[in-house]
Amino acid sequence: MKKRKQFRGSQTPTPSPSPIPLDTNDLAPECIRVDKVYDWVFFANKYENKNFIPDEACRAAVSAALAAGQRVEVQTAPVDPADVSVSGSIIENGNPGKVLIVWTVPVDVTILINGVAECSFTVRTQFTDEIMLCVPVGITNANLNIRATQVIATSSGVLMGPDPFGPMIPLKVVLCKDVQVEYPVKLEVLAKFCFPRPNNIPVPEERLQCDLSLLEFPRQCPGLFPVANCECQATALARNEDTEATFGSGGTADLVTGLSTLRAEICQECSLADSTWSYSFTDTEVGPTPAPTATGFQPDFSFTFDPSSIDRVTCGDDALTAVGEGIRYFDGAPEQLFYELQIFDAPTEGFRLILRNTANVVIFDSGVVDALVEFGECETFADLLGDSDI
């Protein structure tokens, strides 16, 4: 391993940071009746349609203006997502199953000729989606909760269209969509509860025999939804901490002295979805310009790394490890890499970041770096109910 000569410059002191607090997760078992979410998808699409002008007089005026070379513009009014009509139909039940969704978007359009409004009307443009969702047998169309959360409608102007339609208005519509599959169930959950007075006045009544099999619910779709909770949670904060990092592997590896900056919140509220982190490494062995060496110029090893996914979190004693993929920006060039981020609370507080290329070869190892760490175990049903088999 090659050890490079250290080059340090002056550094501006920064205020002493404080740890990132852990969010509390106080729970207690209760039985409630709720709409169970079997699947939940949020996505967006862009559609383009050409629409004819419904008003005959307006079509004639626009055609004459285009033929005369006048300026014809199209203005679109903002669309309220609540005005979007939507219907969903289950084509095929299954895990996953297929669902057809039809969207009808009303867009208020005004046509201006040389800056003067000529006419206004509403264009109703329609789009469809076919998506795969968890819709087991027992789920019906009534259990689909579908809505538009945002609509962006624009037009690039008026186009000359074929007879008999005449001028056409091209519309671009961006739809942000929220699709949920829900079914009313009775669940034992972990929650806090406010008790009313006891119902301690008995009412004589006949004992009824009921078929409990009628209370069965459609099976959840394992592997799709819901996502399993984490068994632990941690935060880490490091600002310009001294680092002796290894770039590369084997005898050609470089040992580089630099500074590490990390901000990480992994499994906040014990949910993998509430996880985020970022990292940067600053090479302190180079000056403002690369220094010449016996084999050429000394390179700057500074880079930033942003994760694009957090695939899995594993927990140990006072430590967790997150793995996934991300992008390293090295001298402005992006590179897809696999990462392993370790955060530990004992015997000392700190972290370690390892990056591998697509051939699973280690190309960066930060080593152990000091950080302010908060670590906590997540409570599960088994923890609170005192039964490890639950």
Image (tube, rainbow, N blue to C red):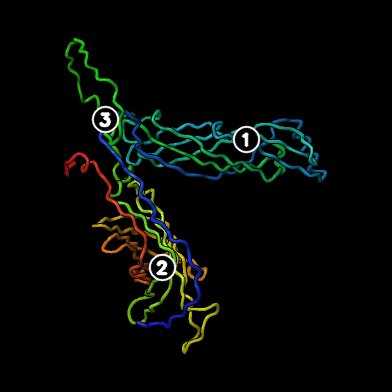
Q: Give the CA distance from mark 3 to mark 2.
A: 49 Å
Residue 31: give its label.
3
Residue contact between numbered discs 1 and 2, judged by CB atoms under 8 Å: no
Residue contact between numbered discs 3 and 1, judged by CB atoms under 8 Å: no
Horizontal side of residue 366 vs 110, given as left or right: left
User: Label 3 amino acid?
Assistant: Cys
How busy is the neighbourhood of tag 3: few (under 14 within 10 Å), some, or many (20 plus)? few
Closer to us: mark 1 or mark 2? 2
State the image quarter where residue 337 is shown: bottom left
| Picture layout, residue 12 above or below residue 345 | below
Q: Position of residue 256 (x, y in %)?
A: 41, 77
Q: Secondary structure at mark 2?
A: strand
Q: Position of residue 277 (x, y in %)?
A: 41, 57
Horizontal side of residue 83 vs 369, given as left or right: right
Q: Nearer the viewer, residue 235 or 56?
A: 235
Q: In the orientation shown, which residue stands out farthest toward the bottom? A: 294
Say which label, 1 or 2, has the lower sequence index: 1
Q: Secondary structure at mark 1?
A: strand
Q: Position of residue 183 (x, y in %)?
A: 34, 31
Closer to us: mark 3 or mark 1? 3
Please tell me which residue is depicted at 19% across the width and 41% down the height of the picture.
390
Instruction: Name the residue beneath numbered marker 1.
Output: 107
Please tell me which residue is depicted at 54% across the width and 39% down the height of the picture.
150
User: Label 1 amino acid?
Assistant: Val
Q: Nearer the viewer, residue 91 or 309?
A: 309
Closer to us: mark 3 or mark 2? 2
Instruction: Name the residue beneath numbered marker 2.
Output: 241
Horizontal side of residue 77 vs 184, given as left or right: right
Please tell me which residue is depicted at 62% across the width and 37% down the height of the picture.
78
How busy is the neighbourhood of tag 1: few (under 14 within 10 Å), some, or many (20 plus)? many
